[in-house]
Image (cartoon, grey):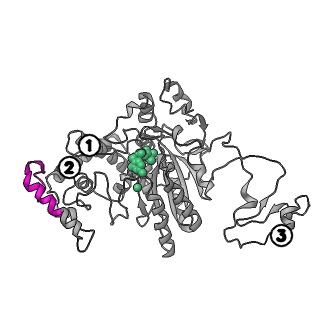
């Protein structure tokens, strides 16, 4: 059973070991510095028997099926759609797990230093790096202040990205603005990086009339046509088959763009995960599936979620090129997504990225994660593996960032967030009629009746109706 994510005692003593290898689900994941490795397994090397996707339905002769003692290599294998399958007289089950876990690609160590023997070529300019850092810090401060606003009763609900800032911002930085995002709900940093303003975030969370959804959705359900960012929708994993479909449409239109979709480890237990991956693989759709494996789906630990070596191997099972990366190393995320995008668009294929990370905050404002996780586990990821601090150390060591700039930026962001919340609070709510608009050109009778009934109820009990929503 899980050692690393065990909710029981003595996690602190495991921490030292984790500096060199990551213990995840009871066995160790080692680090690698090459982004160009596909997932491995203990199955026969695929080189000879790669699926031939344009295989014609074959004519399998009786001889081929029966005479495996024949020396002719043609009859030592089964001619089958997808490529020849070798015969063997050894009855051998494929083991449920391999001894070695799929390694985790990283570039920086936890002190923000380039690891030795890495093949990282510095392609990241100062300009990109500084923007990434500023956005990571903005995301962190925004999350802090919106979270506090929820605690004060000013917003009804909120979700933070604490601990997952690098996945958010570094993946966004590696894409082009034409790439289409289908998020889960913990990726608002991607939208922030694309230029969605703090006021736009606040308008959505406050559900005022400037919100593009006209206040009909819960807070954090952002969406923006302008930023190629599909609406957040709460049901887990529905975005995955949708992403395959959107990517297939890009392919048909021969667009120079791909789809990027995000999901958590919990989402991989949904049927939609499997449908989405399989559809994308078979249709050769240019979509990057980014799984944020943060160890927990609310209170469900990954040891109760699946028994595989995480998610990365599931990509290979569907015929999708896949990689496992350190989600808390912004440089590794940037490099891997950059390479993934290039392959997705140029080679017209799906890619799966499993980013190992941790949700440092509670699942949402409706959760208390200390009820199911050990405090020192949270602390370790918050302090020693903090993606924002790791990246900050790297840009500082390049001479690209200083404490003076840090203090100034922090002060400015705080002021801007506060102002955004105040302005959004003062902005009028959408009028009641908007609850019934935008779906039908001519509202059907049942909707008209509902609106009439609602208005009658408000007239009878005006004290129960929020005074700031125009009737
Ligand atoms: C289909 C469906 N089932 C259950 C839920 C309730 N729910 C909301 S978030 C969540 C956990 C998801 O965890 P994960 O996919 O790992 O993402 P994370 O929150 O860790 O980023 C669940 C079960 C839901 N929204 N949709
Ligand atoms: K969804």
Residue 338 belongs to the span the image colors magenta: no
Dot 1 crowding, Cα within 10 Å, few <14, some 14–19, many 20+? some
Kindly identify which residue carries mark 1.
Answer: 145
Q: Report the residue at 76% width, 63% height from top.
A: 84
- Residue that badge 3 annotates: 61
Q: Is residue 452 found inside the magenta-colored segment of the image? A: yes
Q: Residue at x 84, y 65 (%)?
A: 64
Kindly state the secondary structure of the residue where label 3 is placed: loop
Q: x, y percentage for residue 223?
A: 33, 60
Instruction: Find out whether the residues at labels 2 and 1 contact each other: C-beta distance under 8 Å.
Output: yes
Q: Is mark 1 on a helix, strand or loop?
A: helix
Residue 14 is tagged as none
Q: Distance between the residues labelled 2 and 3?
A: 73 Å
Give how far across and how far down residue 389 sits, in percent. Answer: 41, 40
Q: Nearer the viewer, residue 81 or 346?
A: 81
Asked if residue 347 shows in the view, the reply is no
| Residue wearing tag 2 | 421
**Left or right, 32 with reference to 7:** right
């Amino acid at each position: 059973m899980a050692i690393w994510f065990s909710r029981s005692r003595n996690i602190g003593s495991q921490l030292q070991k984790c500096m060199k290898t990551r213990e995840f689900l009871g066995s160790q994941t080692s680090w690698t510095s090459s982004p160009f490795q596909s997932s491995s397994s203990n199955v026969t090397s695929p080189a000879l028997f790669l699926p031939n996707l344009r295989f014609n339905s074959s004519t399998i002769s009786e001889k081929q099926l029966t005479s495996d003692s024949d020396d002719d290599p043609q009859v030592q294998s089964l001619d089958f759609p997808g490529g020849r399958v070798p015969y063997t007289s050894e009855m051998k089950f494929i083991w449920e797990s391999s001894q070695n876990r799929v390694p985790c690609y990283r570039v920086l160590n936890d002190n923000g230093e380039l690891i030795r023997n890495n093949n990282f070529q510095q392609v990241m300019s100062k300009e990109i790096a500084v923007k990434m850092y500023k956005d990571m810090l903005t995301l962190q401060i925004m999350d802090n202040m919106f979270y506090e606003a929820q605690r004060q009763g000013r917003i009804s609900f909120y979700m933070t990205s604490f601990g997952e800032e690098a996945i958010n911002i570094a993946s966004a930085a590696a894409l082009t603005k034409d790439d289409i995002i289908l998020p889960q709900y913990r990726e608002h940093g991607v939208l922030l990086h694309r230029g969605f303003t703090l006021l736009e975030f606040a308008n959505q969370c406050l559900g005022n009339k400037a919100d593009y959804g006209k206040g009909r959705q819960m807070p954090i359900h952002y969406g923006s046509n302008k930023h190629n960012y599909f609406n957040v929708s709460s049901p887990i994993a529905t975005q995955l088959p949708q992403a395959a479909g959107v990517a297939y449409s890009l392919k048909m239109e021969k667009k120079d763009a791909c789809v990027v979709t995000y999901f958590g480890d919990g989402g991989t237990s949904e049927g939609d995960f499997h449908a989405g991956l399989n559809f994308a693989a078979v249709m050769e759709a240019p979509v990057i599936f980014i799984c944020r494996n943060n160890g927990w789906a609310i209170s469900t630990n990954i040891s109760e979620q699946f028994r595989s070596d995480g998610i990365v191997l599931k990509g290979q099972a569907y015929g999708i090129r896949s990689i496992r990366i350190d989600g808390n190393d912004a440089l590794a995320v940037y490099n891997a997504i950059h390479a993934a995008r290039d392959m997705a668009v140029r080679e017209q294929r799906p890619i799966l990225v499993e980013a190992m990370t941790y949700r440092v905050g509670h699942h949402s404002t409706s959760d208390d994660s200390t009820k199911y996780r050990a405090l020192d586990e949270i602390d370790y990821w918050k302090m020693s593996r903090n993606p924002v601090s790791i990246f900050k150390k790297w840009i500082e060591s390049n001479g690209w960032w200083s404490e003076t700039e840090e203090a100034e930026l922090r002060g400015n962001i705080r002021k801007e967030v506060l102002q955004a919340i105040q302005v959004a609070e003062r902005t009028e709510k959408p009028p009641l009629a908007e609850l019934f608009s935008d779906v039908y050109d001519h509202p059907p009778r049942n909707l008209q009746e509902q609106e009439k009934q609602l208005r009658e109820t408000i007239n009878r009990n005006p004290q129960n109706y929020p005074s700031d929503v125009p009737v």
